[in-house]
Amino acid sequence: MSELLGGPRSLPFPILVGASAGAITNAFLGARAADFPTAVSRLVEFWQSLRPEDIFRTDARTLARVGLSWAADLSFGGWIGTGRGKSLLVSDPLRDLLRERLDMPALGAAIGHGHLHGFALTTTSYRTGLAVTFFDGAASVGPWVRSTRIGVRQRLTIEHVLASASIPFFFPAVLVDGSYHADGCVRLTAPLSPAIHMGAGRILAIGVRHEPRPDESASARPPHAAYPTTADTAGLLLNALFLEALESDVERLERINKTLEFLPPAVAAKYATPLREIPILVLRPSRDLAELVMQTLDRLPYLIRHLFRGLGAASKSGWDLLSYLAFEREYTSRLLALGAADVRARSGEIVDFPTRPMSA
């Protein structure tokens, strides 16, 4: 993207908004907003070099303790179980890695120096069930309250980033601002809204849902008529949380944009929240990401591989779940290569988008 946009030295996106892995990616970019090429280089190196042990503990003692804890709660209930603090994976290594590699004070400095207008990441509050968007930005950006989501101004830390990427059941909840939070995609039904609240005039959205072409051959996934495994069920739920919200929100924004073409500006301005046209360009992967993960299971550490197989991940099942949790360098390298190829394929649209006329 840096080369495609003519090699701008500073970040060409004044507002960065994301959740889950998107929060990590954006934090890397925002922390070096004054040096976009270096930010991209550091980001690529981060994702390309990841190993499972960089994200969660893979040692036998930890996995045994977690397994016994789950077994106690599920088998003996209130007799000896506590029902508290349970996750299948212990993500302390990710916290340590982000503390080492991610300069959060630099993110705040980038905002203070005007290199960024605003930065936001979203979590899900266990206490309220709301999507909580924590943001920092220019003084003109104010908090917001909607029926299922709120925007809260705070100085952002590693804990905010961890919370935004903590998938329930698999990763532990993270304490932020006095309450526990989970992955932001759980309750974020309008993922474009934080960017709009922060004043975005155009939106470049990056999705992870594969949209097959009309002429595309059948999926590479093998036939699978067996009863769904736990991994299949978990993958289905994660897809519903991570993939569908953006697509629905994009459709909603495009409908509003189309409606505004026929609505006099004076009428649109009368709404409590004035309506405005916001052009959007959505980049989606040209391949199903789950298909890229099919060779990854055998490369994971033995005990993690054993855990995933216990959940039902195998050659014909559990691909979607693995696509979210397979932090393995061969898989992430494939993702990076796919992303680069997809951007090159749409280079004309991307270059023209910043200056594309409204209603075009």
Image: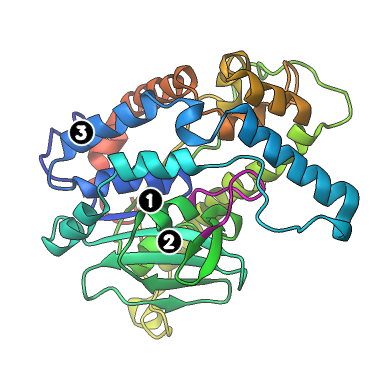
Disc 2 target residue: 257
Whether pointer 1 and pointer 2 mark residues with C-beta atoms closer than 8 Å, the reply is: yes
Residue topped by disc 3: 2
15 vs 171: above or below: below
Tell me the CA gap for discs 3 and 1: 19 Å
Task: Say which quadrant the N terminus sits in.
Answer: top left
Vertical position of residue 269 compared to residue 186: above or below: below
Q: Which residues are magenta?
A: 164-174
Label 1's element? strand
Image spot of residue 172 (x, y percent): 58, 50
Q: Is residue 112 magenta?
A: no
* Residue 224 x/y as whole percent: 81, 21
Most frequent secondary structure within the magenta stretch:
loop
Image mark for residue 194: none
Residue type highlighted by circle 2: Asn
What is the CA distance from the residue labelled 1 to the residue labelled 2?
A: 10 Å
